[in-house]
Image: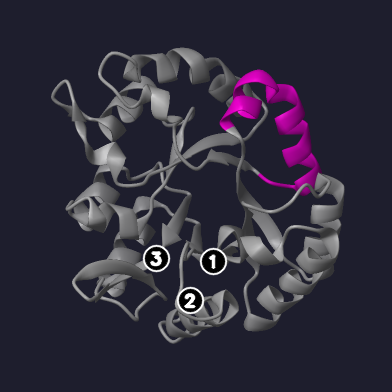
Amino acid sequence: MILGAQLYTLRDYCQNAKDFDISMKRVSDIGYKTVQVSGIGNIPPKTVREICDKYDLKIVITHTNPDRILNDTDAVIAEHDIMGCKHIGIGAMPEKYRSLDWIGQFADDFLAPAKKIADSGKLFMYHNHDFEFQRLGGKYIIEHLMDDFKPEEMGFTFDTYWVQVAGCDIIDWIERLSGRLPCVHLKDLEMISGKPHMAPVMEGNLSFPKYLEAFRCAGTEYLLIEQDYFLESPFLCLKKSYDNLKALGYK
């Protein structure tokens, strides 16, 4: 399994091509070999690819606007071809789908784009937060997704922090989603003043050595480090996570 940087962590430093270039050099200097493109500015895919290639960074997954996936599927696929990226992801389902009377509409809307993405040799990826572990009609939202999309139509960008916040067993859900987790988000959780906060990997309370073995057994390829919010430089957070995981033998 290969370490990568989820660029949403660095979103404030990736809003134009010049800043993106500087940031990718710093990501590469830390030791990362892959990235997820998410939260960056309006930078052409060709430029994104050229800058990442310049620093030997492989683009392995994105978060893409759901409306574009739904309504401009062919162009989205073409852009991912330019970036050399196999996994086309969304950060979450739009809020309108998050109710019992509309959850089924998500598959009605996104199944055709997911099939087209699969036919192109890529995979539609869904990133979880905590709300996917809310029950609708006796099933978790994430179970609706598992049932409505075949593994070749949807993978899951499993996020350790949000599963923990939802009060669910991380190992259990890794096992349940086995074979559908090519790219995952590693994010730790620490308690500050009685509230959960995001932390660099292995500097919080989560048991990552166990999770990493479970991901390996589940067929995970890429371990993307993400931290949405931080109490110090996001570059330093990415370095701490990388160094901690490198000490376990990952890179």
* x then y, percent, for residue 8: 58, 58
Of the image marks 3 and 2, the number of the one nearer the N terminus: 3
Q: Which residues are magenta?
A: 66-85
SS category of the residue bearing label 2: loop
Kindly report which numbered mark, 3 or 2, lies closer to the viewer in this rendering: 3
Q: Quadrant of residue 117?
A: top right
Q: Determine which residue is flagged by label 1.
A: 2
Q: Determine which residue is flagged by label 3.
A: 187
Mark 3 and mark 1 in contact? Answer it, CB < 8 Å. Answer: no
SS category of the residue bearing label 3: loop
Q: Look at the image and say whether residue 67 sits in the magenta stretch.
A: yes
Along the line of sight, which residue is nearer the eye, 19 or 24?
19
SS category of the residue bearing label 1: strand
Q: Look at the image and say whether residue 102 sits in the magenta stretch.
A: no
Number of residues whose C-alpha sits closer than 10 Å to that of mark 3, classed few (under 14), some (14–19) or many (20 or more): many
Q: Is residue 77 above or below residue 182?
A: above
Q: Determine which residue is flagged by label 2.
A: 250
The amino acid beneath tag 3 is Lys
The amino acid beneath tag 2 is Tyr
* x then y, percent, for residue 145: 35, 28
Q: Is residue 163 left or right of residue 129?
A: left
Q: Is residue 198 above or below residue 202?
A: above
